[in-house]
Structure formats: C-alpha cells, structure tokens
Image (tube, rainbow, N blue to C red):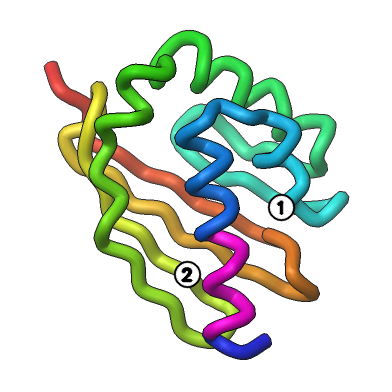
Amino acid sequence: MSTDETRTVPDHHLAAWRKGDIDAVMADWAEDGVLVNAAGDFVGKDAIRPFYHDVFGKYFPDDVRAAVDLSNIKVEGDVAFCEWTGGIAEYAADTIIVQGGKKVAHTFSAKYQA
C-alpha cells in the first residue's frame, strides 16, 4: 500500500477511538489481526474486541480520550507509528501494520503515571 492509503487506516482508527466506537475501531482490523501489548497477545477480532471494551470502560473514558494528544503520527509504506500522551499515559507509542486496507498488526506500549 502507499503511504497515503495506509494513513487512512490509523486516521479512521484514532477518530473511532476518540468516540469510543468499538464497532468502528474493529472495522479497521483484519479478521486475523494481532494486537500485542503488556496486557497480552490478542489474535483475531474476537479476541481483540474485549480489549477495547476494557480500555474504554476502565482506563480511557470519553472525557479522557477527548484530551489525549495524538498529534505525532508518522506513516511510511505499510507502517504507521504514533507517539501520544494523556489520561493515565505519561508517554505511549503505537505501531500499526496495514495490509489490504486493514490493520494486520498493532503494538502498544506506555509509561503510566504513578
């Protein structure tokens, strides 16, 4: 995919994430997509969906998601990288791999506030 085509996926994902729209977030994922973070490895949409439910309900409610700074996004080819801050995250970074217009892999790491 081109950089411009790849860019549409994280842009849509972040807009859906801000709204807390799990269906829209999940629409960006490939059926066999892989999410890897400190909470575990989640393989496939059925395993990934509950992760977002917990994130929106427990850690990043509506008001917190609205205030998160997601301005530092870099995209090259099939790879998107985003550094961000806000809510309980003092610093966080995501890497997203896009193929065929869908997220096939997504990693996330954060340093949380004490």
Q: Secondary structure at mark 2?
A: strand
Q: Is residue 110 magenta?
A: no
On the image, which quarter does residue 48 sit in?
top right
Look at mark 2 in the image and give the residue it sits on: 80
Query: Which quadrant of the rendered structure holds the C terminus?
Result: top left
Residue 2 shown left or right of residue 80 in the figure: right
Which residue is rendered at x = 30% and y = 39% of the image?
110
Rendered location of residue 8, percent (x, y): 59, 68
On the image, which quarter does residue 40 sit in?
top right
Rendered location of residue 108, percent (x, y): 44, 46
Q: Secondary structure at mark 1?
A: loop
Amino acid on which disc 1 is placed:
Asp
Q: Is residue 5 magenta?
A: yes
Residue 44 shown left or right of residue 69 in the figure: right
Q: Residues within 10 Å of mark 1 (few under 14, many from 20)?
A: many
- Report the span colored magenta: 4-10
Looking at the rendered image, the disc whose residue lies closer to the viewer, 1 or 2, is: 1
Amino acid on which disc 2 is placed:
Ala
Look at mark 1 in the image and give the residue it sits on: 28
